[in-house]
Image (cartoon, grey):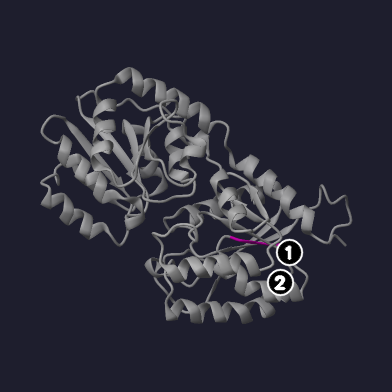
Amino acid sequence: MIFVDSRDVLMKILHLAKKYYPMIGGDAYTVNCLKKQQIRIGHTVYILTSNCDEIARDEKVFKFGLKDSSSNLDKITLQRLISLAFLFFWGFRKLRELKPDIIHSHSADMGFFISFAARFYRIPVVSTCHGISFDDKQYFFLKRLAEKFFLRYSGFKKIIVVDKNGLKILEKAGIKKGIYVPNGVDIHKFERKQEKKSDGMTRFLFVGRLEKQKGLEYLIHAANFLKEKNDFEIILAGDGEEAENLKKTAIEFEVEYIVKFTGKLSEHALIEQYMRCDIFVLPSLWEGLPLTLLEAAAAGLPIIATEVGGIPSVFAHGENALLVKAQNSRELAGKMQKLMGDKELQKTLSTSARKLAEKYSWENSAKQLETVYKKYIEWD
């Protein structure tokens, strides 16, 4: 340990994450961005993540447990439970070797299983909830019960939420350790202007995992309402276990020529989509504060999103986005129609969204997290 003022000391930080780069997902993306920013500051950063072939490995990225697929990581399976048991023993062996100053968990179950070793070695643990499930009955009962148990009994020094609605949920459940630290966005990635095609086609963009949570079947239904009167495309950028079902739904509604599936894209190709499309749409059934919305705002895209989770706490209807009720294809179609026909509204929402994005940065997020970390580290 360096004997200097604790305000200036450099730390060893261990992040725990179910998913990590180059996987698709808000937690994977967040941890990778935080790692880059914290390394830039001068900290030493380690990553502990799942044993998936999709995750890149390097000398500071460790994998634990049985080999698994990304689609299983959010489920309660025997394979996952065995892996978490391995994590319990990994903690006692590896924490003695790494000697991190702080453990930052991005998964309540991983945080719980490593907390025993962390307490033994007197290493503080904080945890980020990238979305809280125990208050939402759309999630499986055992998943909700397990999450609440882990958050209550893991001994986390602080439970970080990325949207202000999360604080209310924690307080309602009697969990008093909540603190709000928003995610960031790299606005510089979206500063290069690209000339939009002047072919009269309106291009809607969705970015994310193709899963039930994202409500994409309702977006396809909305396309069905609009297909006779409008010249438009819907670009679904991403991959996931619902991809084939969504393609079948598009064929069933005879909108397969409108709905385009890109599959997983490189970062460069994804930025190209943000810059070439006209409107961003997120029809999610539940969310925390999606990073893709901040990216769309940084790209200056007018946004249509469902009023779920932490979205209404950041995006205001009619000011920097249009918000709709979840699972309402007809209302969604109405907002899509409205934006297609109102270029002035597009411009207003675009300008406001960009100004909103400029308030968020990974630099600010990293600085706020430093303050949280240093409060609980026992400096030598």
Image point 59% across, 54% down: which residue?
A: 172
Q: CA distance from mark 1 to mark 2?
A: 7 Å
| Image coords of residue 23 (percent x, y) | 43, 59
Of helix, strand and loop, which one carries label 1? Answer: loop
- Residue 70 occupies quadrant: bottom left
Residue at the top extreme, as displayed = 344
Q: Nearer the viewer, residue 75 or 32?
A: 75
How packed is label 1: few (under 14 Cα within 10 Å), some, or many (20 or more)? Answer: many
In the figure, 151 relative to 167: above or below?
Answer: below
In the figure, 341 relative to 236: above or below?
Answer: above
Q: Is residue 318 magenta?
A: no
Q: Amino acid at mark 2?
A: Ala
In the figure, 131 relative to 268: above or below?
Answer: below
Residue annotated with mark 1: 124
Residue annotated with mark 2: 118
Label 1 or label 2, whichever comes before in sequence order = 2
- Give the tally of numbered discs: 2
Q: Which residues are magenta?
A: 100-105
Image point 15% across, 41% down: which residue?
A: 224
Q: Which quarter of the figure is the N terminus placed in? A: bottom right
